[in-house]
Image: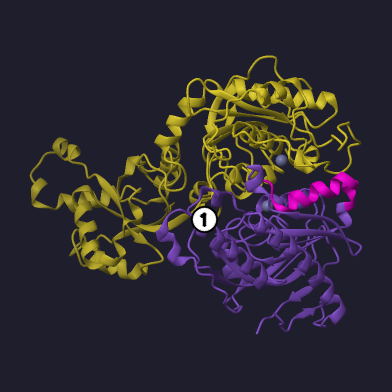
Amino acid sequence: MALPRHVVDPNGHVLNEEERTYHESFMREAIGMAELALQTDETPVGCVFVKDGEIIGRGMNATNRTLNGTRHAEFIALAEILSKHPISILQETDLYVTVEPCVMCASALRQYHIRAVYFGCWNDRFGGTGGVLTIHSDPSVDKPYPVYGGIFREEAILLLRKFYVQENEKAPEPKQKKTRELKTEILPLEMVNPDQKAKKLKGAKKENVPVTTTVFAAKETVTVSTVTSTLKEIVAVDTTISTAKIFQQEKPNDQNPGGSTVSVALESS
Amino acid sequence: MLPDSCPPKGRLLPLKTRDELRAALETIDVYAVEVPARFADKVLNIFRTTYPDLFTNNFQHIRRVAKFSFLPPHIQSNFSSLPDLWEEVEGLSDEIVDEDAEQKEKKRVELRYVITTSTSSLPTRDLLQLLATNPPFTGLRIQPQVFTVPIPALAPTSAEQAEQWSREYWPVSYRNTNPYGPHPALVGRNTAEIEDAAPIWLHLAEEVGEQVRAAGYGESVGCVITDGSGKPEELIAVAGDCRWRSPNGEPMPKEASGNVMAHCVQRAIAMVAKKRLRASGKDPETETLAHIYSDSPVTAMEETAYSVDNTPPNGYLCVDLDIYVSHEPCIMCSMAILHSRFRRCIIRRRMPLTGGLTAETPETQAKGDIYGGSRPAGLGCGMFWRPSELNWKFLAWELDTGVEKEVGIEDTLHA
Ligand SMILES: [Zn+2]
Ligand SMILES: [Zn+2]
């Protein structure tokens, strides 16, 4: 889907084609991993870790195969990286993942001192970098990391929808089948007051947040019916996916005295 | 440092939820009107008929009509009550005009304080006017006394809390319910079920932590997974921390956070998954890079628990299982417990700087521990019970031994 996109620096300067293409190329690789997951009946979430422009690890969700609810794409890729590299390499590494990291992965990434996280669509069920909690920036003993969302958001959502339709087709109950039709229309983004979203999601204001990720998001409910299979419970995302567009800002604070601002705005029209 | 040589003695304290703690912080200013006892209900009724919209159910936990003597001392001293004046006024009435001094003393006017509504919902002058034009104030030279008092905005979640609020704010009543967390009856039942064995499991968790530390594989943090749904209780998995264990299985230099994915909770969950694969006749060793997670036993104790086939073949993740952890799990591990659908979690010690389960924050603890005891402030995540935000919830306790034992690990460590 060719969409006008603007990646903007702190001064409102639109980043060049090359810089934009850079991030999109890795997200495309992550989507490839998610597609692979879909083919093997795993929740289609995929990721790649990138250091100096090179992919050093790939992962896709493996919770069904392993019967382990913690085998998320990020964990699979991290195992590959740690089998070849010292742990410290992660400090110079960025993650590209099709769905926002969950609370567990968001915390793991922070403890590993990941450099930055780029993701596709939001995870309203247990997202850890803004979707539900803000583990990447909450007060913690570890350094915060910046997150950028909304890169190939539509593609990421579509993959998840395909998965739910696919799972529904396997569901034994015929009454489930009437809702299995794949919806391909994805609602355009809407501007929402980020404070309202933050309040709605967290029920409380955040204080002393060293890195503020400002989210302009529209909540979209995917209407594909829920899956009856218990396997659905393992999945890393729910059918409710919030679509999002992000401005990422770093404010001056103790851990980041100078402060810096980088904004990424992905617009669909 | 060695763990106790025998299981710790103590009692299980249910962890407070975020909502409970936040509810406890909220107060609301209300009007309290001073009237002789026999007029209390009348005043309340007049208010109800005049302002039916303001007569909400929000004050069900508050004694709307309170005796002076039941009020907290600091409230009593703020109320410039006028018993003598009322005495005089009441004394003019026909009922007691002929009585002698002794009887009059017996009939001494009992005052009541009536909670009408919140100060934000009605201007004071409107309330004063309503009172002045109705009994007992009609035609009296005595002015209605209206006081502003703060009361807890929400219902108490325990009897102790109700008692404390009654001492601090206003007489409060407690109904055996908890809108901000698990129902007290449910908690009570579960506490009774696990309290005898919990110190033993926690002791085992500490022991395996000490073993992996001694082996150089990790920090002195450990956990035990049990199946408490049947009798006898089954030991399902035991795991210690392996963050300092290299991919080739050797101790490695302690740099930064080590291998985060090898925290004991992660390892134990992986062992349960592998036992389930084995029980369903599948090969548990198909993950080619599984050794990175240290998901196989590294101590004899771990091996003993792992080798027993006692997971039902049709089981699902960690549903119906309990997890005992020597230290409050970090946010990653707390979420792993949620993802795995555990039933109950019991911790030995809090980790205020890194723990994901407890809900206390400096803000909630600013006025001292509202539940008594001494629960330290932490990050306030309270991840075990956030049903409106996260996808699962479970019951959680800490073991209170009364003595603060040295933690044995850095307080900045992620357990
Ligand atoms: Zn995850
Ligand atoms: Zn942990």
- Relative horizontal placement of residue B39, taking residue A205 as reference (left or right): left
* Residue sitting at x 37%, y 69%: B123
Q: Hey, which residue is sitting farthest top in the picture?
A: B5
| A209 to B222, vertically: above or below | below
* Residue sitting at x 87%, y 46%: A87
Q: Which residues are magenta?
A: A70-89
Residue A248: x %, y % from top left: 74, 70
| B204 to B397, vertically: above or below | above
Tint of chain B? yellow
* Residue sitting at x 31%, y 70%: B126
- Report ligand 2 position as a quadrant: top right
Q: Quadrant of the N terminus of chain B?
A: top right
**Which residue is label 1 attached to?**
A170
Is residue B82 visible in the rendered structure shown here?
yes
Q: Is residue B96 magenta?
A: no
Q: Secondary structure at mark 1?
A: helix
Foreground residue among B78 and A220: A220
* Residue sitting at x 74%, y 49%: A75
